[in-house]
Image (cartoon, rainbow, N blue to C red):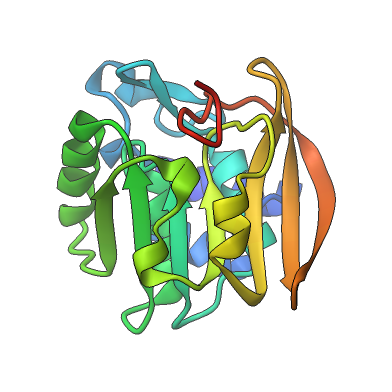
Amino acid sequence: MSGNEEMIELLLRQGYADDGVAEAMKKVPRELFVHPDYAKASYSDTPLPIGLGQTISAPSIVAFMSKSLDVQDGMKMLEIGSGSGYQAAILAVLVGDSGCIYTVERIPELIALAKGNVEKLGLTNIKFIEGDGTKGYPQEAPYDRIIVTAASPSIPQPLIDQLADGGKLLIPVGSRMFQDLELVVKVGKEVETSNLMPVVFVPLIGEFGYK
């Protein structure tokens, strides 16, 4: 059994992943997305530096966020914070060839890194956009699901506006040090918000995030 498979089996036993997320993660080796200096820790359940002050999230967080969004085949999704491309790659497998992931990243070097990583897996349903993620990407709205992989002091209104009716948004909200992972469900013009778990993410920088 590979390190990836052992990690996924553990995530299943601990309840972070469900069967669908586990199958997607099996197709996305984490070792392709970590910095070479940390390759030996690829399958440890810990965040790792990817350069430029950013990190790749712990596998348990990636699995839990993917599971909590209940991603289905054919969905159109928006990701804020591409990082090294790991989360986007898993989501791309979950939505399948008929779905699409739009991922917004403010750091050009990370876009280049993430593009190179997902190309190794032959994934073609991920579109990378350089820009202020707190503004979302209105050109392709509305989205069935939105995932934010950085911490915001509040939920950016543009992301709520770009969420489809019945859609779900997942975002860490709080201070720069500690946050709560909040799940937002949009029903008509109303939103229902619930706290899922305490988390620690790098800050979301932008007009509607941290300055």
Is the residue 170 above or below the residue 179 in the image?
below
Q: Residue 171: horizontal and vertical position, in percent?
A: 64, 45
The front one of 168 and 34 is 168
Q: Residue at x 50, y 33 (%)?
A: 57
Relative placement, left or right, of 171 versus 189 is left
Is the residue 55 above or below the residue 25 in the image?
above
Is the residue 147 above or below the residue 173 in the image?
below
Counting every numbered tag in the picture gives 0
Relative placement, left or right, of 162 versus 101 is right
The part of the image, by quadrant, that contains residue 42 is top left
Residue 99 appears in view: yes
Residue 28 appears in view: no
Q: Residue at x 83, y 45 (%)?
A: 195
The part of the image, by quadrant, that contains residue 139 is bottom left
Q: Residue 166: horizontal and vertical position, in percent?
A: 69, 77
Q: Residue 114: horizontal and vertical position, in percent?
A: 24, 43
The part of the image, by quadrant, that contains residue 131 is top left
Q: Residue at x 42, y 58 (%)?
A: 90
Q: Residue at x 39, y 58 (%)?
A: 137
Is the residue 5 above or below the residue 178 in the image?
below
Relative placement, left or right, of 27 versus 94 is left
Q: Residue 4: horizontal and vertical position, in percent?
A: 43, 45
The front one of 111 and 63 is 111
